[in-house]
Image: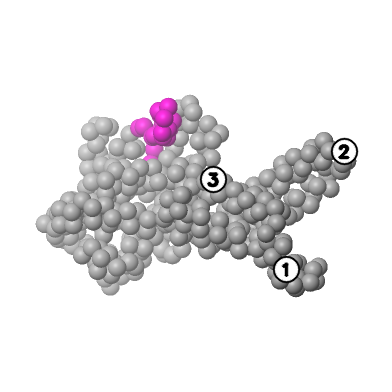
Amino acid sequence: MSLPHTRTQRRVRRTLRIALIWGIAGLLAALFERNILAGHGIPIAFSDLALGNLAEYFLVGLIAGGLYSFVLRDHLRKLPFIQAFPRAAAVIFLIVTCTHAALPVWMGQVEADAAGILGRLFSLRFLGQYLFWSLLMGATMLMVRYNDQYGVGGWGHLVGRYHKPREELRIFLFLDMRSSTAIAEELGHVRYFQLLNEVYADITDPVLDSGGEIYQYVGDEVSVSWLLRKGIKQQRCLRCFFAIQDRIKAKAAHYQQRYGHAPIFKAGLHYGPVTAGEVGLVKKQVIFSGDPVITAAHIQSVCNQFGVELLMSEEMLDQLRLPEHQYERRSVGEIPLKSRKRTVRLWTVDRKGTRPGGKTAGPSATAEAATSSTAAQ
């Protein structure tokens, strides 16, 4: 069951955004070039320069953006910028070299003589274009890393969406790794940190594919958030959990071989009105305050009690409107909420056909699973 947003779609959108920004950079370059020429007494229409630059920069942006998004980024984003930029600059060097050496010969504009090729490569024009495109690529990489730093809400930081507190209806998914304390004691702090870092990297794409925002990492816990209308569309918030589950299970053998443990996550889902706003003058962060955050965390904390990997509130279930041919849902009981002085009914949801024999477990199976899970903890 694929998520509404695929990784390819995200990469295509990123490539188009890069091409658009490079096109705008081309218009600014045309403006500077026109002013410099006018200052030297060479009149030229801005429209002529602008159209040429817009087409050139947009096309180069498509090529460079596509190369970065589809080929380089998965590798470069794991490296510090100081190490990633020289690798990207080397790729730009190859591209500029080809355009100055091979392309003019291929188009029949110049003769294929070694002296002419070397002359073009060791020219100030070549150096200037190489430095310009490399710096533009570096700025693009910084922009993408800024977006990674702030997640899906990066644009909101720039435009000041949360500069003043505002109320929003949001969904929260709290994820926690089972038996994390025992695993940490066995592996030691350094190897346990490596395990967490690798797990977090693996769950990032399912979150982004679902349109979610990673709200916080707290030890072995991860909280993900969606605006209500976005999270319930095509059950994105629920499908995000199953996509994470599938991703971790697909790499279970790798984790078992490298760390001696295959991570298993339990999760809690809830939604409600929260207050969102930026805090801090340095290292600003958007935080969400309200009962739904506390409730989602509490729901996740009782997964072991009911012997399941996913729990959600009845309010959340009503919002999702699950297709009966795709999902099985089962009420598991109620828990008290101190913050609201009432109880909340909990449900667990599975995809059709994921249980042995395709049957929904009964109360006795639930009790047995809860006992086994508690013993494992």
Name the side, left or right, on which 268 lies relative to 282. Answer: left
Task: Find the magenta span and give its range.
Answer: 271-290
Residue projecting furthest to the front: 115
| Disc 1: which residue | 115
* Circle 2: element type: loop
The quarter of the image holding the N terminus is bottom left
The quarter of the image holding the C terminus is bottom left
* Circle 1: element type: helix
Residue 5 appears in the picture as rendered: no
| Disc 2: which residue | 41
The structure residue drawn at horizontal position 38% and vertical position 34%, both measured from the top left corner, is 288
Q: First in sequence: mark 2 or mark 3?
A: 2
Give residue 180's position: percent from left, percent from top. Answer: 20, 53
Residue 115 is covered by the magenta coloring = no
Q: Marks 1 and 3, Cα distance to the nearest angstrom?
A: 40 Å
Q: Nearer the viewer, mark 1 or mark 2?
A: 1
Q: Marks 1 and 2, Cα distance to the nearest angstrom?
A: 34 Å
Q: Above or below — where is 316 with respect to 327?
A: above
Q: Nearer the viewer, mark 1 or mark 3?
A: 1
| Disc 3: which residue | 143
Residue 96 appears in the picture as rendered: yes
Foreground: 188 or 267? 188
Pointers 2 and 3 in contact (CB under 8 A)?
no
Pointers 1 and 3 in contact (CB under 8 A)?
no
The structure residue drawn at horizontal position 39% and vertical position 42%, both measured from the top left corner, is 215
Q: Amino acid at mark 3?
A: Met
Give residue 135's position: percent from left, percent from top. Answer: 59, 48
